[in-house]
Image (cartoon, rainbow, N blue to C red):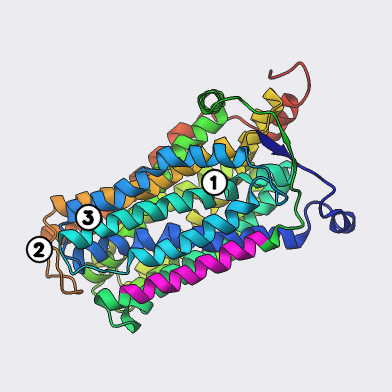
Amino acid sequence: MDVVPDTRAGSADSAETPGLPRRVHAGYALGSLATGAFGTVPGLVLLPYLTDTLGVAAGLAALLVLLPKAWDVLVNPVAGRISDRTRSRWGARRPYLLGGGLGLAVLFAAIFAAPFPPGPAAAGYVAVAFLLTATAFAFFQVPYVAMPAELTDDYTERTRLMTWRIAVLALAILVSGALAPVVVTAGGDGVAGHRWLGLFVAVLIVVGAVGAFLGTRAAPTGTVVASEPSLRAQLAIVAANRPFRLLLICFVIQAAGIATVLAGVNYFAEHVLRDPETGPTLLFGCFVGPALLVMPLWSRAGARLGKPRAFAYASLLFAAGALALAAAPVLPAPAVYLVVAAIGCGYAGQQVFGMAMMPDCVAYDTARTGRRQAGVFTGVWTAGETFGLALGPGIYGLVLQLSGYVSSSTGEAAAQSGTARAGVLIGFSVLPALLVGLALLAMRNYDLTPERLAAASDPGTER
């Protein structure tokens, strides 16, 4: 079961301005405070927390970060299926924004509660807490990402909606990522500092979840209609949607590349820039700050070039910048930060157009089949994206292990060999450049244009 837009909701605002009311744009975008914080902070701090505070070997730490999020590959489609079948006075999706978001906040704080001293028990506790948190995130993220395909049927309006969302996402990444090391340091570093970090991020998640729930109360809630009768049948429909399939493959691989950059920030600042105190915050500021400024430019580029081509240009900018970071040991620090800013500009475009093309693929399926199944599509999408974001730290941890990285239980990084420092650098530069750049090969045959989408809606064609 799924929903179709009910244009009666928010009709007063709709009569004043075309498209969705601005408060719906802003309210929906607030949810990215939650998704941005959860998508950023574990990828940024969890691996170094395990290796440099709990004394876990880099290879084992990589598995502990990867496996709980890999669980989302299974649970996300189920979350989508459940939200598709939900009937409530708040609609199919909004109940999960509140319930899933509040559960996510509590469980996130629990990850860093550290009830056990450094050792196997502490590592096992983190893995279990992270698994439960990933499950709660699935029940927030999947309904949240499903909403744009149901809030509007307009191809261009979805881009505007995603521009708002990605702008807040960039802000969430900036606030949570740049302040994470500051909060840890202010809290006393080590276990105590990470406990404060858990509480700080939990507050961000609550603000985002409650804000999205309240902000979308004037949005279309929809009516329940028939959908494919089983999860297996719905997944078969997803597999048959060629544009969605190609976009998903590309986006998952690129998510892994982006996540290797996130996972390597602390290591890169410590062992390459030799600036463990201010380096992580400056790197995040340079990565996300310019992204906020170029977001309107990417929106215009998409209108002029088309979403697929603009997406490709953004990806190539990211890849070229990441590859240039391989020269970081011989570059002055200001030049390194400028390169990181260029990478951030590419990342902003990737996110805008990837997120805007995904609802187009869902709308294409609706036009072809006459059924709305946004929950299942977004369940598969977020499962793939979450797996990619988990795979990045896993790959980075494996690179550290192979290069001989030495773990520590003191809360401070141990001295590393030249080989280990080379592993830190390669994982932060060459590896993400290859993942993001080569992933574009999957998009060579992506051909979902506004014209084709319109043709699919015409009876007798694209059926």
Tell me, yes or no, whether the two marked residues, 3 and 2, touch with CB atoms within 8 Å.
no
Residue under the point 41% across and 56% down: 133
What residue is pinned by disc 1?
A: 142
Residue under the point 69% across and 53% down: 160
Residue type at mark 3 is Ala
Q: Disc 3 or 1, which lies upstream in sequence?
A: 3
Checking the image for residue 17, the label placed there is none
Residue type at mark 2 is Ser
Q: Disc 2 or 1, which lies upstream in sequence?
A: 1
Q: Residues in magenta?
A: 194-213
Crowd around label 2: few <14 · some 14–19 · many ≥20 (10 Å): some
Element on which disc 1 rests: helix
What residue is pinned by disc 2?
A: 417
Residue 191 picture location, percent across and down: 26, 74
Residue type at mark 1 is Val
Crowd around label 1: few <14 · some 14–19 · many ≥20 (10 Å): many
| Lateral position of residue 145 relative to residue 402, left or right | right
Q: Is residue 203 highlighted in magenta?
A: yes
Tell me, yes or no, whether the two marked residues, 3 and 1, touch with CB atoms within 8 Å.
no
What residue is pinned by disc 3?
A: 61
Cα distance between the residues tagged 2 and 1: 43 Å
Residue under the point 47% across and 64% down: 105
Cα distance between the residues tagged 3 and 2: 20 Å
